[in-house]
Amino acid sequence: MEAHAVPRSPASSRFRPKQRISHTKSRNGCFTCKKRHVKCDEERPTCSACAVRDEECVYPDSRGTRDQRKRQLRLSRETSSIEGDQPQFHPEIPNIPLRPLHFNAISPKEAQNVDSQSTSGLNMGDLYLLQHYILHTSKKMTLNQNKTAAWQQVIPELAAENEFLMHLVLALAGLNILTMRNPSTHDGQVCSNRSTARKVPELRFIMEHHQQGLAGLHKALCDPSEPDAEVLLAGSMLVAAFGFASFGIRDLEPSAYAFLDHSFPSVLGSDTSLLTIGSLHIQSLQLVRGVTSILGQFWPTLRTCRLRPLLHFTNSNEDWKLCKAKLCSGVMPSRHIHSRRLRSFAAGASYAVSELRALNDSLRVAAGSDQMTESSPSVASAHSGQSDSGGKSRLDTYEEVIGVVEDLYMRIVFILHMKPLNDQASSDLEVHADLEDAAIAGWPHSLPEQFVVSLASQASQGNLDIMGGVSLVLLAHLHLTVAIMDAIWCYGERCDIEIHKIKTLIDGLGDQRLMTLMRWPITVIQG
């Protein structure tokens, strides 16, 4: 048998391994070729493979090291796995200049003219004051949720459309920050903030805002066209709040007096020996009385406006007269009252009113007696010779003021004797809310005009006699009705300062009867 070669089967020839053509590796190829595992001819700026496929050709940074190039390659692979089949590589962020967008908008024929004073009046300090008002001040103006919405939402909306309202808002916020420096206030958590302490505005800037707001409010009142009652009410509420809150300003520099401009009273300095009647905030009472008169002029309109919650007082009535005997007996309220200030007030309110009436009666007897001594001519002239602009004697005016004091005191005591709706209440916030709804802070509007005029006259003259001392004692008792409402920022301890000022003046006068009458207000605020 002849030997011959055995033919190979087709299967064995089909699976024979192919011989790869030897070539050198491309270590500096583009990212696209490396991802496709093909050789890159390293043509720049675009290799042949990327040119054929019309793909983006990006090379690694030739200046980097091998490890850097590996990191760039790994980053490109991770990016491509996230972005999809068509990755976009951004090894370097190009330096593209920022340019404004261009729109095909038709420019107006005449540019809108903006009042330079209205735009330049707001700076970063003013924006900070506005922020503080919305976040803090507006929430501390009331204990009623509906009233809070008016202070926090409606008034800023109106201020955004009326420049003088914005000035009043900024002034109130600045005064809030300024009085927060006092560690005895209830805002100690803010006082401890160093960044806030550095942003305390200067008094002169606050007063400038307040004066511009007052000027704008006066202009709006005198506008011959139909006034916006809602705007006027917002301005009056801001001015009234500023008037009460200003009682808390103390330790001011003498240079600050120049910015008060006859529309705002001087303020007590740190040296009490320089205390005069003019240092009392008497003119602020006139301010409050003036702006609250707006309510009577536009009452039908204001009852339906967005600020109507600020005019709703459920406890402003004379229900106390139904149980006057019990309230005047000096019976202590129930144990649900925790505040020493409130309990002290309830225990001595009726007795304080009786002492004021006794003083006024004794002055009447002394004024009508033929045996008046020459050492007290002011008392004799108070009833017989001198009379107020309204034709009443000063003693008649005092009788009216004592009636206002009695109504306020008994209204407060009546609320303190009411059982709280929430028996589990652990604080006096519900009681303070009821006191707020009794319109206690509205007493300046209830005072006779002759009384306020006499106070302002004595303040301008700078002297104090016995009858002037009686006026100040009555004023201290009126301040006490607001001083017990220490749960609301612009009340409470702000009025304590005024009461202490009056005590200093009465002590300097040296009349023992008046000094005795001042003991009870001091006892109440000291708790």
Image: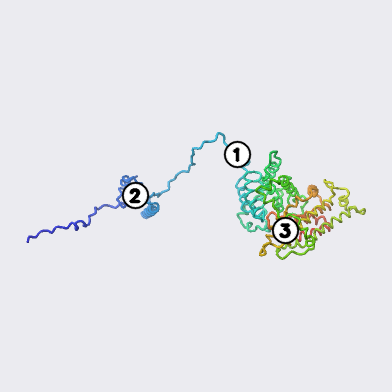
Q: Nearer the viewer, residue 418 or 515?
A: 418
Instruction: Classify mark 3: residues with Cα within 10 Å, few (<14), some (14-19) or many (20+).
Output: many
Q: Nearer the viewer, residue 515 or 153?
A: 153
**Residue 149 in view (yes/no):** yes
Q: Position of residue 172 (x, y in %)?
A: 67, 50
Residue linked to disc 3: 484
Q: Nearer the viewer, residue 153 or 44?
A: 153
Residue linked to disc 1: 114
The amino acid type, in three-letter code, at marker 3 is Ile
Q: Quadrant of residue 345?
A: bottom right
Q: Nearer the viewer, mark 1 or mark 3?
A: 3
The amino acid type, in three-letter code, at marker 1 is Val
| Lower position in the chain sequence, tag 2 or tag 3 | 2
| Lower position in the chain sequence, tag 1 or tag 3 | 1
Q: Position of residue 27 (x, y in %)?
A: 32, 52
The answer to whether marks 1 and 2 mark residues whose Cβ atoms lie closer than 8 Å is no
Q: Nearer the viewer, mark 1 or mark 2?
A: 1
Residue linked to disc 2: 30
Q: Is residue 441 left or right of residue 396?
A: left
Q: Position of residue 469 (x, y in %)?
A: 81, 53
How much space separates mark 2 and mark 3, taking CA atoms?
82 Å
The residue positioned farthest toward the bottom in the image shown: 335
Instruction: Classify mark 1: residues with Cα within 10 Å, few (<14), some (14-19) or many (20+).
Output: few
Instruction: Specify the quadrant that holds the N terminus.
Output: bottom left
Kind of element beneath mark 3: loop
